[in-house]
Amino acid sequence: MRAIILESVLTCPHCNFAKQEAMPTDACQFFYECGNCRTLPRPNPGDCCVLCSFGSMKCPPIQERRGCCGIGMDAPPHLGKPIFWGEI
């Protein structure tokens, strides 16, 4: 079993500002405020969180191959899509 990496370098897709951050092990991180331009990027389609989309490492649940946000790795991709307040 490989060790889980708990830090990731997040790179803003808007301004390319990069910062090393600790990753949560018990939750998905749907939003991340860029420390430079203050935008709030959302995950790319098919990714469970901003760490998987814009980080140098996938989030801990994905690294462990147990799925993310309570969704198993074998679930259809639409079941893991986060719902944002503006989409309700």
Image (tube, rainbow, N blue to C red):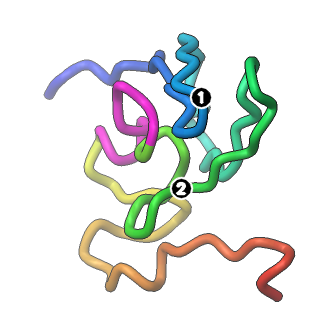
| Element carrying mark 2 | loop
Look at mark 1 in the image and give the residue it sits on.
Answer: 15
Residue type, numbered disc 1: Cys
Residue 43 disc label = 2
Q: Is residue 53 left or right of residue 24?
A: left
Residues 33 and 1: in front is 33
Name above or below for residue 37 compared with residue 68.
above
Residue at the (42%, 36%) spot, across then down: 60
At label 2, which amino acid type do we have? Pro
Q: Residue at x 59, y 28 (%)?
A: 15
Dot 1 or dot 2: first in sequence order is 1
The segment highlighted magenta reads 54-63
Q: Residue at x 36, y 37 (%)?
A: 58
Query: x%, y% of residue 68?
Result: 46, 57
Task: Based on the picture, tell me whether residue 57 belongs to the magenta stretch.
Answer: yes
Measure how far apart labels 1 and 2 are at the Cα level.
16 Å
Which image quadrant for residue 83? Answer: bottom right
For this view, does 20 lie left or right of residue 39?
A: left
- Look at the numbered disc 1 and give the secondary structure of its residue: loop
Which residue is situated farthest in the front direction here? 15
Query: Residue 70 placed where, x, y %?
Result: 52, 65
Q: Residue furthest left?
A: 1
